[in-house]
């Protein structure tokens, strides 16, 4: 896991290495200062030698100044290294997510991916900054302080060694009990983000049904769960500070008692093995050792918190997309012919019932095919396999005479344009949104695509025309306008295959008819697949496919299906009868 994470350090390796170097210099200088203080007391103040006091005083000032400078440099380089590491980590995760298939995204959920890109990365960033700084400083301070302490008095220095195992065992027990709680907390964060996303995305529905109290109750339930878990974890982590203080104060008391007793019980300070200055420096070293141990405990707490986050980040980085390019992918599609050869498909690999069951269908290049079926008949699942948004579970799909798995994914999807019923517009101008289809499209091409999609007239009715700003999700345009803009965007790709997945459901029948007529006349060589609920939207197609429960139950022209398909005839008669009654 560490190796996988550290691969994101990259260009910030220099700052990551400089930080421990600066910290080492800072630590060595801080270790020297107590020894200089002992010399100052014993050989300067006690001997009333002002020349020596000035000499050691200057050395103390220089040591303190250099320690301050190196500490500042260490803080600066640690901040750069950790911030850069976090930026690269987000970059790597985001680019990895872009490679995911729909099934990979379904596995993690959108809310979970967002939590991992934000909260989890921040936790790892804080741990990294603490690690490259304090994880070097604390061990160095402990080791050097122990060495200098043993040089002064070996017996008194054993007090420090006795405190270390007590702290080590205590901190280990705390970490073992706290880590599982943080794992649970971050999974709960995923649920919290999902609830917030659903609420904001469906805020109009929530308000129209006055379901605010229910949404608040749902949010409060998850928020309370996070509160309880964090409280439980913090209660256990709270034992960390009393344990540290117990070891600190016990060591200080024992050191002061035995040290002072050694000095006072001796009648002549010159005859004793411990001087006042040395006792002062020992007390300072004791403080340094125990404060360093406290730093170790802080590092351990941060590692406990960040470990769960690191595991979740690595899950994203190590996830392999279900859809991969072949070793030598095809870079061109010959034409828009489509063949389904005994295709079966399931979203879940271990599903007993397939979503699509033994589909066989041939579509000629340039042909217009309508797909009709009730809700849940797997119409959308069928067309999503063409652009290889999912892979078939059995059988194969051919485009241009070759299996879709033989093509380069990007190239294939550039030749297959899909317009969904709930297609998305992004914040920015209409012009910018249209150029998602072709970023180099000219203004004339934009206008022509919008004319085919019957969008040009309403765009020009806006004060800013094609420069009109679209809010996030297209919330400031109607559903029908949003669908027509998405159709125009797809047309700008100049695809070999155009799929309209119920993408004219929000437009009136006249506009629907004009769009179909324009598609037939302006792009006759493009294969067009139209999924619709209205028979009128597909009845002039070259072929109409009727689906039910994941199977093709009938196929033919409008007239043929009226004679041969009971399902199609019932749908047609119910819609035409309903239309006649409405007109009456």
Image: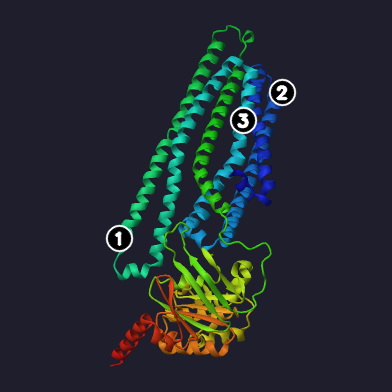
- Between residue 476 and residue 405, name the one nearer to us: 405
Q: Residues within 10 Å of mark 1 (few under 14, many from 20)?
A: few
Label 1 and label 3: CA atoms lie apart by: 55 Å
Q: What residue lies at 46% left-to-right and 45% top-to-bottom? A: 183
Nearer to me, 81 or 66: 81
In the structure shown, which secondary structural element does the residue marked by tag 1 occupy? Answer: helix
| 339 or 378: nearer the viewer | 339
What residue is shown at x 36% (from left), y 70% (from top)? Answer: 204
Indicate which disc, 1 or 3, sits on the residue closer to the N terminus.
Answer: 3
Mark 3 or 2, nearer chain start: 2
Q: Residue 525 at x, y = what percent?
A: 59, 85
Total marks shown come to 3
Q: Are marks 1 and 3 in contact (CB under 8 Å)?
A: no
Q: Nearer the viewer, mark 1 or mark 3?
A: 1
Which residue position holds label 3? Answer: 141
**Image quadrant for the C terminus?**
bottom left
Note whether residue 392 is visible: no
Q: Evaluate if marks 3 and 2 touch, with contact meaning CB atoms under 8 Å apart.
A: no
Other residues around mark 2 within 10 Å, as few (<14) / some (14–19) / many (≥20): few
Q: Indicate which disc, 2 or 1, sits on the residue closer to the N terminus.
A: 2
Residue 78, relative to residue 107: is it above or below? above
Q: Nearer the viewer, mark 2 or mark 1?
A: 1
Residue 28 point in image, percent of width and height: 67, 31
- Residue pushed farthest top? 267
Residue carrying label 1: 214
Picture disc at residue 321: none
Q: Residue furthest bottom?
A: 584
Q: Which residue is mark 2?
A: 51
Secondary structure state at the residue bearing disc 3: helix
Which image quadrant is residue 560 in? bottom left
Local SS, label 2: helix
């Amino acid at each position: 896991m560490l190796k996988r994470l550290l691969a994101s350090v990259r260009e910030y390796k220099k700052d990551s290495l400089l930080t421990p170097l600066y910290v080492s210099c800072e630590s060595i200088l801080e270790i020297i200062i107590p020894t200089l203080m002992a010399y100052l007391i014993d050989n300067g103040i006690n001997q009333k030698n002002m020349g020596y006091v000035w000499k050691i005083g200057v050395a103390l000032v220089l040591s303190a100044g250099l320690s301050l400078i190196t500490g500042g440099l260490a803080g600066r380089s640690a901040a750069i290294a950790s911030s850069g590491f976090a930026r690269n980590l987000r970059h790597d995760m985001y680019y990895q997510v872009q490679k995911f298939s729909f099934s990979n995204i379904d596995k993690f959920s959108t809310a979970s991916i967002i939590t991992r890109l934000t909260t989890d990365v921040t936790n790892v960033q804080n741990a990294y900054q603490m690690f490259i700084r304090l994880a070097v400083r604390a061990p160095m301070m402990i080791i050097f302080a122990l060495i200098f302490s043993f040089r002064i008095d070996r017996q008194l220095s054993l007090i420090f060694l006795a405190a270390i195992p007590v702290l080590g065992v205590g901190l280990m027990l705390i970490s073992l009990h706290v880590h599982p709680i943080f794992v649970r907390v971050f999974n709960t964060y995923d649920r919290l983000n999902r609830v917030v996303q659903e609420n904001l995305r469906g805020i109009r529905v929530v308000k129209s049904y006055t379901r605010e109290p229910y949404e608040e109750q749902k949010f409060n339930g998850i928020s309370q769960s996070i509160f309880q878990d964090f409280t439980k974890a913090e209660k256990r982590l709270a034992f960390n500070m009393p344990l540290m203080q117990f070891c600190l104060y016990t060591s200080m008391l024992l050191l002061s008692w035995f040290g002072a007793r050694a000095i006072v019980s001796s009648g002549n300070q010159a005859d004793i093995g411990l001087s006042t200055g040395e006792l002062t420096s020992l007390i300072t070293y004791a403080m340094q050792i125990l404060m360093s141990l406290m730093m170790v405990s802080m590092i351990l707490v941060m590692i406990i918190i960040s470990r769960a986050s690191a595991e979740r980040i690595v899950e994203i980085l190590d996830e392999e997309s279900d859809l991969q390019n072949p070793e030598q992918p095809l870079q061109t599609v010959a034409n828009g012919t489509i063949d389904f050869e005994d295709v079966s498909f399931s979203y879940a690999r271990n599903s007993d019932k397939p979503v699509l069951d033994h589909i066989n269908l041939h579509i000629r290049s340039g042909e217009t095919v309508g797909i009709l079926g009730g809700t849940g008949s797997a119409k959308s699942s069928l067309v999503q396999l063409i652009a290889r948004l999912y892979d078939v579970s059995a059988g194969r799909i051919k485009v241009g005479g070759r299996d879709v798995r033989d093509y380069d994914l990007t190239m294939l999807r550039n030749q297959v344009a899909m317009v969904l019923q709930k297609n998305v517009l992004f914040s920015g101008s209409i012009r910018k949104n249209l150029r998602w289809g072709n970023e180099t499209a000219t203004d004339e091409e934009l206008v022509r695509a919008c004319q085919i999609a019957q969008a040009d007239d309403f765009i020009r009715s806006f004060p800013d025309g094609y420069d009109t700003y679209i809010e996030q999700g297209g919330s400031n345009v109607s559903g029908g306008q949003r669908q027509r803009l998405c159709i125009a965007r797809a047309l700008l790709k100049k695809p070999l295959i155009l799929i309209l997945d119920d993408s004219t459901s929000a437009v009136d029948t006249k506009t629907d008819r004009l769009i179909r007529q324009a598609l037939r006349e302006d792009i006759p060589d493009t294969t067009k697949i139209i999924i619709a609920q209205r028979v009128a939207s597909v009845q002039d197609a070259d072929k109409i496919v009727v689906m039910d429960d994941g199977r093709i139950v009938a196929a033919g022209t409008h007239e043929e299906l009226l004679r041969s398909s009971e399902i199609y005839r019932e749908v047609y008669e119910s819609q035409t009868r309903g239309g006649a009654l409405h007109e009456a």
